[in-house]
Amino acid sequence: MDSPDILKPASVDAPFFIDCDTSYDSTIEFSKYLCQVIYLVPALILHLALLRVLLYTHRKEYLDNSYFFIFSMDCVVPYYLRVAKLCIQIFATINRMTCVLSPLGYSRMWKCFTPFMVVIVVLSPFTVIWNILISRPFVINIYGGISFGYLRRFEWASLSLFFLIIHLVSILITLISTAITLTYLCRLSERIKSIERTLCSTSICISVCFILNSCFQIYFVFVRDKYFKTVYAFQYIAFDILILATPMILLIYSKQLRSQVFGFCHKARVISVGSGTS
């Protein structure tokens, strides 16, 4: 993320010094980190429990469905690779749309496309961080802790602007795909409709969290005021909420997956939506 001009070194080659900021109370700041640990550690455990079910204990049931493969990618992609997560969000909503548009050809279509999707997700972060890789990074004292900024090698290549563009594209694709999904959902059989409603509801809830994060990107591009540090902190909280909400939303909507993650007795078979048996 771009940082305010007052925090930057004078030039690419100019020296800069890091001083401890003693204006913050150590007890309060430690309490903030402790609060993050309290909700992020359970989120990590939940992600690992989901991945265990999706990729190991019940992989034959779930990985035949491309949506759960996409969801598994989202779980393993580190949270700081936000562009990759945005791409995954785009593919997840398109996945739901193609399933209701072409239930019979859906599985074959995504089986062919999945390798290309993985390559796109892996390479996507470089579309925005290339300027960081060739620029000079520096440490920022903020809220009693540290973050990192960079002195742009190319002034026009703003990281916040690139993020904003990608967020807007993601929102646009999400809205269009979701609208089409909801329109065609009512035309499916009741059996498939129930399954699709679960996955579609999951995608919509996750999309709302992404929209919240997009609002912060709009602020960073167009607004620079005295509230910058406060908004800077809240953007990380918003992304933490997204990390925590993603597995919880899926578990709330999927009784089958919830029972398998928490070890309840439930023997129902997972239906591969869009397969030939649909």
Image (cartoon, rainbow, N blue to C red):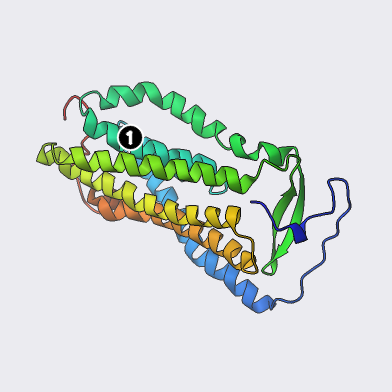
Residue at 16% in and 38% down: 192
User: Could you tell me how many numbered marks the image carries?
Assistant: 1
- Asked if residue 179 is positioned above or below residue 30 in the image, the reply reads above
Which residue is the extreme one toward the front? 222
**Where is mark 1, residue-wise?**
95
Callout 1: SS: helix
Q: Residue at x 71, y 52 (%)?
A: 149
- The answer to whether residue 32 is above or below residue 163 is below
Q: Where in the figure is residue 202, as x and y percent of width and height?
A: 31, 49
Give me the residue at 44% from left, 24% from top: 115
Q: Is residue 86 toward the left or the right of residue 11 in the image? A: left
* Residue at the (59%, 46%) spot, across then down: 161
In the rendered image, residue 170, in percent from the top left (x then y), is placed at: 44, 42
Above or below, 231 against 56 in this view is below
In this picture, residue 18 sits left or right of residue 156? right
Percent x, y for residue 226?
A: 65, 69
Q: Quadrant of residue 189?
A: top left
